[in-house]
Amino acid sequence: MPDQTQPSTLPKPEQVRVPYAPNRNDPGERRFREPPAMSVQKSYRHNTIRLDLPGKVLIDVTPAGRGAVTSVDPGTVFGAESPVWIVSGCNTHGRLSTVYDQASSVEVLHEQLDAMDWTWHPAVLMAPGREWVETGAVVLGVSRDEIVSKALRHGQEAVLLWDKRGISVVATGLSDDVVDGLSVAVTTSPALLGCPMRFGADVPCTRQGGPFGSRAMAVATMWEQHRALLVSALGCTVCEGGAVCGDGRPTAISSSYVPSRRGGWQWGPPLSDAAVDAAFGEEGDDEDDE
């Protein structure tokens, strides 16, 4: 019987809530990233999965809702190829990762899938509220042992199995707090391709923070980074990632670690002088964050 535990039925906010990094000058634990809204194990049951299918068909796979007893069979999407697996290429070995770390590790995953001559398509996994996003692949027609071995070597704590019962967690053994789980019934729908910060609505998002004051600039900087993260993974048909404010874009002088199933944004070490010069060269005279 599928696991019918589902996320809250409360309506989504009009705009994605960014899990901001604490101010680096805050004392104690407040300097570290905001803890996740749900456990890592629960996040695998409730994530939304966007699949990029042949013919540029984008669909979202989501939990079917409280009380659902039937689930979309992946055979109706992919034909006779089974089983269907979803694997992330991000947050390898649970390490804090920058945007560039994530892009590099996903590229390696895709190259390895090609080298093994497996059938796969791009996939995006994200929290219901889009506090974090991962890119990876949906893989067809390989065995459980094969995909778990590949995911473990790539530093992933779990893969997702999609069959006629729904989507279930298959642990790789990398993390003690992620174990095999029961199936969650799922449904599919065409992906909404509007503003990713507005959950696909065809309206522009509104930047938070501002150009004046250290904290306001830090908030604006992190908001822009979160927006860029979502635009890169999901695209945007409203402004294609263009400027949303007339006062330019803030430019960070420190690196940052992206949010994940284990917490929000976190500031990293200062960028090199060359990286800062390059950033300001691209953005002109925009303000920095801190």
Image: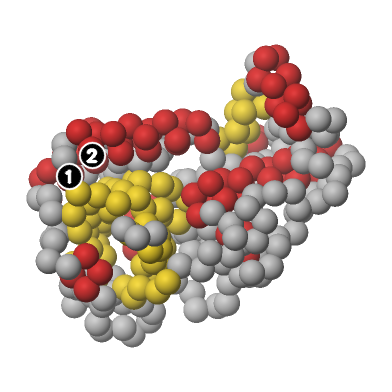
138 or 35: which is nearer to us? Answer: 138
Regarding residue 113, the answer to whether it shows in the image is yes
Please name the residue that numbered disc 2 is placed on: 113
Please name the residue that numbered disc 1 is placed on: 118
**What's the residue at 28%, 70% (across, down)?**
184
Mark 2 and mark 1 in contact? Answer it, CB < 8 Å.
Answer: yes
Q: Amino acid at mark 2?
A: Leu
Element carrying mark 1: loop
**What's the residue at 60%, 60% (across, down)?**
237
Q: Residue furthest front?
A: 55
242 or 222: which is nearer to us? Answer: 242
Mark 2 to mark 1 CA distance (whole Å): 6 Å
- Label 1 environment density (alpha carbons within 10 Å; few <14, some 14–19, many ≥20): few
**What's the residue at 41%, 53% (across, down)?**
124
- The image quadrant that residue 249 belongs to is top right
Q: Amino acid at mark 1?
A: Trp
164 w.r.t. 179: above or below = below
Choose the circle earlier in sequence order: 2 or 1. Answer: 2
Name the image quarter holding the N terminus: bottom left
**What's the residue at 66%, 20% (across, down)?**
275
Spot occupied by residue 44 in the image (x, y as percentages of width and height): 35, 58
- The image quadrant that residue 141 belongs to is bottom left
Mark number for residue 190? none
Judged left or right of residue 219, residue 164 is left
Regarding residue 36, the answer to whether it shows in the image is no
Spot occupied by residue 180 in the image (x, y as percentages of width and height): 21, 56
164 w.r.t. 68: above or below = above
Judged left or right of residue 258, residue 92 is left
